[in-house]
């Protein structure tokens, strides 16, 4: 919801905290943890191979990892 994936509207951390009735800092913790998971090579490889590259334009992932995953997918 924060990034508006899947054609949805992007939401601020404040909006999300109000929607889920948790603090903004808790929302930040959740987003940071999700981003860490998305950056892990095993996850990034599978996401890139499915064609959901839009995720990595929102999440700051190393371009070398993206190219490596694309190479593995094309082999």
Image: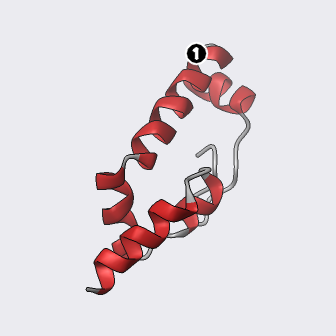
- Residue at 59% of width from left, 24% of height from top? 27
Quadrant (top left, top right, bottom left, bottom right) of the C terminus:
bottom left
Q: Is residue 52 visible?
A: no
- Residue at 51% of width from left, 70% of height from top? 53
Give the camera-side residue of 18 and 46.
46
Give the camera-side residue of 14 and 65.
65
Q: Is residue 24 above or below residue 32?
A: above
Q: Secondary structure at mark 1?
A: loop
Give percent across and percent down for residue 57.
Answer: 63, 62
- Residue at 34% of width from left, 74% of height from top? 49
Q: Is residue 27 above or below residue 61?
A: above
Q: Is residue 43 above or below residue 35?
A: below
How many numbered badges does the structure rendering display?
1
In this rendering, position of residue 50 left or right of residue 36: left
Give the camera-side residue of 39 and 13.
39
- Residue at 62% of width from left, 50% of height from top? 60
Query: Residue 14, located in which quarter of the rendered image?
Result: top right
Residue with the most extreme bottom position: 74
Give percent across and percent down for residue 43.
Answer: 33, 53
In this rendering, position of residue 36 left or right of residue 24: left
Give percent across and percent down for residue 30.
Answer: 50, 27
Q: Is residue 39 above or below residue 50?
A: above
Q: Is residue 56 visible?
A: yes
Scheme of colours in the image? secondary structure
Residue named by callout 1: 22
Structural crowding at the residue carrying mark 1, measured as other residues with C-alpha within 10 Å and reported as few (<14), some (14–19) or many (≥20): few
Give percent across and percent down for residue 45.
Answer: 34, 63
């Amino acid at each position: 919801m924060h990034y508006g994936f899947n054609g949805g509207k992007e939401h601020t951390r404040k909006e999300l905290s109000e929607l889920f009735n948790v603090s903004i800092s808790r929302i930040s913790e959740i987003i940071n943890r999700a981003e860490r998971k998305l950056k892990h090579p095993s996850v990034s490889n599978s996401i890139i191979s499915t064609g959901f590259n839009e995720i990595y334009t929102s999440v700051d992932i190393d371009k070398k990892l993206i190219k490596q995953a694309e190479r593995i997918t094309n082999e």
